[in-house]
Image (cartoon, grey):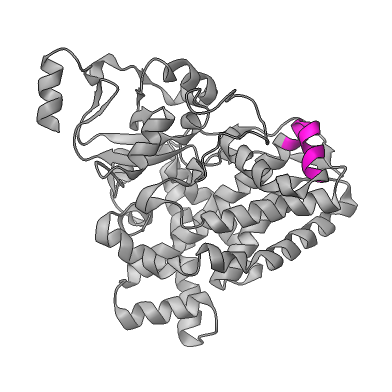
Amino acid sequence: MAETAEQTQQDGLLEPPEAVPTLTVAELEADPHGVFRAWRSRLPFVGHEIAGFVVLRARDVDLLMRDPRAQATETLHPRTRGILEGTLFDIFAHGMLTANGPVHRRRRSPFTRTFAARMIEGLRPGIRAAAEGLVRDWLPDGEVDLVARYAALIPARIIAGILGLPQDDVPRFTRLAYEVSRVLSFTFGPEDIPDLEAAAVALQDYVLGILEVRRAAPTDDFLSRFLAEAEATGELNPQEVVIQLVQMIIGGTDTTRVAGAMQVALLLQHPEQWAAVRGDPGLIPAAVAESLRYEPSVGSAARVAREDIVLDGHVVPAGSLLMLSTLSALRDEAAYARPDAFDIRRADLPRLHPIFGGGAHRCIGEALARVELEEGLGALTRLAPRLRLAGAMPVIRGHAGIRRIDALRVAA
């Protein structure tokens, strides 16, 4: 492939990466949708001052999610940020999310049955009851921050229940997870690394403590079974056991928190669509899917080019860090009609939602996230049908990795 690209480039048919502009974090953070819209029709990718190249178009993002030439980054991401050791580094070095091939399959396999769609569907009644209980808790207050009082609590309490974590620990591990997840973005500076490392150490120590309790007194829960199987088979070493659970806590709390708040904000911003969902619960899955498209909670997936990759006459050099931008792809004019319009009745979303990635690394928590988002929205339409925005739309920040959201003030 590299020889073919080199020969074609000599023939003048391919553009070298020097012809591609490099964008700054500041301009991407200021207006990611606008910046991506401006470049998407002109180039298949743009340079990024930290992350190599940002792939912009839906068809290319979809291809590279599944293309063996674009592999998981392993430890390339932290190394580009000057993180060469410590717990932050270990999260990348020993976790399933950044691993490839047999190592990835070995680290992921203990979770596949627990998070299978059929198993998760069995949890739906319990998730519905939990969501309704949360609504009833804050409904008498009239006006609340829906992020803190609802959207953040649903995924945290559910992942705690699945993994067997004490519900009283939810505030502690969610705070740490939200802090550690910043390392997946490109919006932190060298001065932030000590705080991120401290949060990662604290979250790892929390998991170690929970595992010690289960090792001493096993119960009938996921953690006890996972620990027993890991120690019996020897397929995961002790460090891998801890890091997989750290990653599951981060993935099981932060992304759904953002998505749960944003879908409510978008519907309330479009009262006719809120009314439609309120009147027809059958529209809830479509509303969830459109919200995930319009303002995805995950802005990108990271990959590394294992060889030269040609996209529309431009070459991504081997060894480059790639940011597969779901944020850009989900607003691509070539893939969606009126992509900048929020429309829960749109018919052009693919059956497999791009927000959950593709290939071997498609999100293991997809089924759980969908059920949490659907039941969270359903509980609001049933118990708080007159819900309205009590302030400005929440600000969602971030052009890559897990995005961040501020308060969502609503009144019932």
Residue shown at 30%/38% (left/top)? 80
Residue shown at 49%/26% (left/top)? 332
Task: Name the quarter where the N terminus is drawn.
Answer: top left
105 relative to 393, above or below: below
Residue shown at 29%/73% (left/top)? 235
Q: Position of residue 199 (x, y in %)?
A: 48, 54
Q: Position of residue 355 (x, y in %)?
A: 50, 42
* Residue 198 seen by the camera: yes
Q: State left or right for residue 44 relative to residue 371.
A: left
209 relative to 178, above or below: below
Q: For residue 389, which quarter of the picture?
A: top right
**Front residue of this view, candidates 200 and 412:** 412
**Front residue of this view, candidates 54 and 173:** 54
**Magenta portion: prevailing SS class:** helix
* Residue 170 seen by the camera: no
Instruction: Give the magenta part as a residue range.
Output: 267-278
Q: Residue furthest front?
A: 347
Q: State left or right for residue 41 relative to residue 220.
A: left
Q: Position of residue 366 (x, y in %)?
A: 52, 54
Whether 269 is among the magenta residues is: yes
Task: Name the quarter where the C terminus is drawn.
Answer: top right
Whether 386 is among the magenta residues is: no
68 relative to 397, above or below: below
